[in-house]
Image: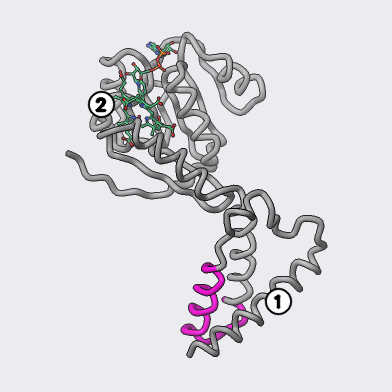
Amino acid sequence: MSAYYPIMVRLFGKRCVVVGGGAVAERKTIALLEGGADDLIVVAPQVTTRLEELAAAGCIALLRREYQDKDSEGAFLLIAATNDRLLNSGIAVYAEKRGLLVNTAEMGEAGSFITPSVVRRGELVIALTTGGASPALTALLRRRLAAQYGQAYEPFLERLHALRKRVLAEVADPELRAAVLRLAAEELPNEDDQGKNDFGRGMSSGQIDFDIEEWMTKLLRAAERGR
Ligand SMILES: C[C@@]1(CC(=O)O)c2cc3[nH]c(cc4nc(cc5[nH]c(cc(n2)[C@H]1CCC(=O)O)[C@@](C)(CC(=O)O)[C@@H]5CCC(=O)O)C(CC(=O)O)=C4CCC(=O)O)c(CCC(=O)O)c3CC(=O)O
Ligand SMILES: NC(=O)C1=CN([C@@H]2O[C@H](COP(=O)(O)OP(=O)(O)OC[C@H]3O[C@@H](n4cnc5c(N)ncnc54)[C@H](O)[C@@H]3O)[C@@H](O)[C@H]2O)C=CC1
């Protein structure tokens, strides 16, 4: 069994290469785009319709041919997702030698990272893995988490972020600051709020500032009482 260390990687401005164009390569390409990849090359003789559409829309560069080692020159991250086992493991060896981050869609241990299942709600990102023990369970838990942490978390996070900026700028006492931010986080959206509670929708920026100001005042009072 391997141990894994989870990190959140910034991909903006970094070359990423996906080798393969089937269902698995498509899923990983979309996950890379959702993760901010803006310099993404997909190399495969055959690709899915969705990958063709992404190329037509300018989201990815498509090389419709067999992979060559030169395709990964200058890459930061590489994903080997072909149905050719030997090629996938060859790419992993090549990439590891050059210090590139590499994932193989089979034999996860052959690469330097594996891909988790992800639930995104704006700035909230929940990523999970079973380390290759049961990808089916990973996908099942992702569906459960998506239902549990609904759309309302996106505006909730925006509101928390706006509040935190103000609190960091205006509350000097570190203990009080932490207490206020902990209380704010406890105001979790409830199930009935799913889809509602849209932060700032229809509000002017002045109104949003006022809303955050009022919230901060209320939280400061509650935090002071709790001391
Ligand atoms: C090791 C890893 C390497 C990697 O790809 O990084 C890997 C490897 C393999 N997966 C296989 C099969 C399946 N994979 C899925 C689904 C996902 N697999 C993903 C990741 C990973 N898969 C990494 C481990 C992550 C972990 O364990 O948590 C997810 C999370 C993300 C993603 O794909 O990016 C995505 C869910 C996305 C979502 O829906 O949220 C399903 C379920 C389904 O399709 O519904 C099945 C069928 C059921 C089953 O087998 O359990 C096979 C056998 C292939 C064969 O039979 O030939 C191998 C090869 C092997 O095990 O050697
Ligand atoms: N990690 C995961 O979640 C899963 C992994 N797998 C593994 O991933 C592999 C790929 O699965 P699918 O996408 O369903 O396969 P697929 O058969 O639909 O697609 C294979 C792709 O590889 C491309 N390819 C083949 N030789 C190539 C070469 N020399 N250079 C560039 N591209 C080449 C083909 O053109 C095709 O686009 C499977 O063999 C399986 O072992 C399968 C299911 C889930």
Residue, disc 2? 107
Q: Quadrant of ligand 1?
A: top left
Instruction: Please name the residue shown 61% across and 28% down the image.
Output: 59
Magenta segment: does it hold 1?
A: no
Instruction: Please name the residue shown 60% across and 83% down the image.
Output: 220
Element marked by disc 1 = helix
Q: Nearer the viewer, residue 33 or 64?
A: 33
Q: Quadrant of residue 84?
A: top left
> Percent from the top left, x then y, of residue 195?
66, 49
Left or right of 183 in this view: 88: left
Residue, disc 1? 213
Whether residue 35 is situated above or below residue 185 in the rendered picture: above
Q: Which residues are magenta?
A: 168-186
Whether residue 75 is situated above or below residue 9 in the rendered picture: above
Left or right of 227 in this view: 193: right
> Percent from the top left, x then y, of residue 138?
36, 37
The numbered dot on residue 48 is none
> From this viewpoint, which residue is outermost toward the front?
192
Amino acid bearing label 2: Met
Instruction: Please name the residue shown 61% across and 78% down the image.
Output: 169
Which secondary structure type mostly characterizes the magenta part of the structure? helix
Whether residue 184 is situated above or below residue 193 in the rendered picture: below
Magenta segment: does it hold 169?
A: yes
Instruction: Please name the residue shown 81% across and 69% down the image.
Output: 206
Amino acid bearing label 1: Glu
Q: Nearer the viewer, residue 92 or 186?
A: 186
Give the mark nearer the N terminus: 1 vs 2: 2
Residue 97 visible in image = no
Left or right of 155 in this view: 28: left
